[in-house]
Image: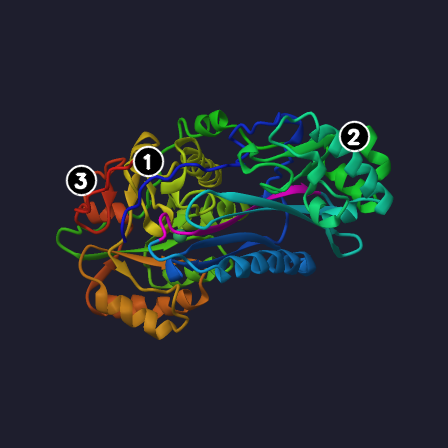
Amino acid sequence: MAAMLTGCGIATASPHVKPLVPSEPTLINYVDPAMVHGLSTRSLNTGETAGRHVHAIYPAVAEAPLLTEKLRETVTERLDRFTRHDVPAGAFPNPEFNVEWQLAAASPEVLGVRLRIGQSMGSGWSESRTTVWYDREHRRALDSPDLLRDGTALTTLTWLVRRELALRGPLVNPNALRPTPAMFDSIGFNPRGDLVVEFDDEQVGLGVAGRVAVAVPSSTAAPLLSATGLRARRAAVGTATLTSQEDMLAARRDRPAARSYKAGGVDCAKAKCVALTYEDGPGPETGRLLNILGAYRARATFFVLGSNASARPELLRRMRDEGHLVANHSWSHRDLTVLPPAMLTDQLTRAQYAITQAIGQVPTLMRPPYGVTDVQVASIARRLGMSVVRWNVDVEDQRDSNPRTIARRAIAQVKPGSIVLMHAFRGATVDAAPEILRGLAAKGYTFVTVPELYGSRPMEPGRTYDSGAVSTVLEKQSVS
Ligand code: ZN
């Protein structure tokens, strides 16, 4: 897979990047998902298919199937629209679709899930935001406008927001705002209980304006809210917002580096070693995968996504306790080579923080999403103390749902020192695991974590590894 060059001209709405509008009052809550019982995550990932980079993560809550279904429908509908676009031949960088989520509120009464859906058809990045609510008492999944009492409340809110937008300067057009539910599909609350309305890029202004959002003071907004709206506001008040990057970096100090506690018993200079790597998890299939690996006494390396890790920290602890190695696969699976340095760093530090919080150890390996890397990715990985790990065996489990085909491919392609790419959330991949483990064990292989392939030679931060031999792939010079 070719390394990619850095792109520019990205309009971003990351909570860590300062938008043109004052960010503080419009920051929506960020509730720790591990607090919600029965929450897991789903990934839609078509990988590299047809030249597109696609990754969408959304939460699933066991007690709220209607919420899960609404989120799935929202994401799938948007993905379908994206894939209907033809990819221009030689599009560069690759068209990309990415969904990440956060819990905007969680209480015994309500749950609020905010989706950030971003896409690029090759150049530029545009993002839309949707917040879906779930009334736990009435077991109903609701759109954001349902937090308002009625149509009159929507009209009043439109007027209030328009008045505020008029003060935002020439990039924002208040007259683009209409009292339609579609324009108000992302409503949440800040920790003070002010109502926050946010818009998609280009919805009420030029894309360069970034995220445009308005906070309506709590006392003004209260009379506009429906019963669910009042519950939602109650749930949001006092909740913590995102952790700052300084806090995230500080949390890593004095923590040991992540390693397999079972490492050290095998000398890969003599034994036939293979490193199985599972990325994108943890997900619904990860527990089953751990059972299988345990039954065969095999160790693996898990490149986890930070957003999934924060939802299922107990699965990361299981990985650690069972002798596997936990590593960083970024926060939300964006193509890192098209991100400006601040966002790239943010993708890695947020994941690093979530993993460290879960297992008390700091990952020393990272795998860039889609395996695409460049000098900037390598240099930031070096600064954060991580080696870049790719692979030299792809079992193509993203294109195949037949476990036997996946297993045969793995068994046929593995050589001593191989690093094997697989995906932790795919049922077929997990189904293929017993046959892979049996087949390779029969050929004399030992299953180790990635650093064990290199024995006593420590892996160097910032260096790229794709098999037992250090990568010979020259990373292309990035241009800005
Ligand atoms: Zn991945």
Q: Rounded to the nearest whole Å, what is the CA distance between mark 2 and mark 1?
A: 42 Å
Q: Residues within 10 Å of mark 1 (few under 14, many from 20)?
A: many
Query: In this figure, what is the number of numbered marks?
Result: 3
In the image, residue 271 sits, relative to residue 326, either above or below, namely below
Q: For the point 35% across and 57% down, which residue is it? A: 89
Task: Tell me if 470 is positioned left or right of 437 in this view.
Answer: left
> Between disc 2 and disc 1, whose residue precedes?
2
Dot 3 beta carbon under 8 Å from ligand 1: no
Q: Amino acid at mark 2?
A: Ser
**Element class at badge 2:** helix
Task: Tell me if 333 is positioned left or right of 214 in this view.
Answer: left
Dot 1 beta carbon under 8 Å from ligand 1: no
Q: Nearer the viewer, mark 2 or mark 1?
A: 2
- In the rendered image, is residue 462 in sight? yes
Dominant SS type (magenta): strand
Q: Rounded to the nearest whole Å, what is the CA distance between mark 1 and mark 3?
A: 19 Å
Q: Position of residue 439 (x, y in %)?
A: 26, 70
Q: For the point 63% across and 26% down, which residue is it? A: 169
Q: Position of residue 408 (x, y in %)?
A: 28, 72
Q: Residue 218 shows which numbered tag?
A: 2
Q: Rounded to the nearest whole Å, what is the CA distance between mark 2 and mark 3?
A: 59 Å
Q: Amino acid at mark 3?
A: Arg
Q: Position of residue 57 (x, y in %)?
A: 52, 52
Is residue 102 on the magenta stretch?
yes
**Magenta-tinted stretch:** 91-106
Q: Residues within 10 Å of mark 2 (few under 14, many from 20)?
A: some
Provide the residue designation for mark 1. Answer: 381
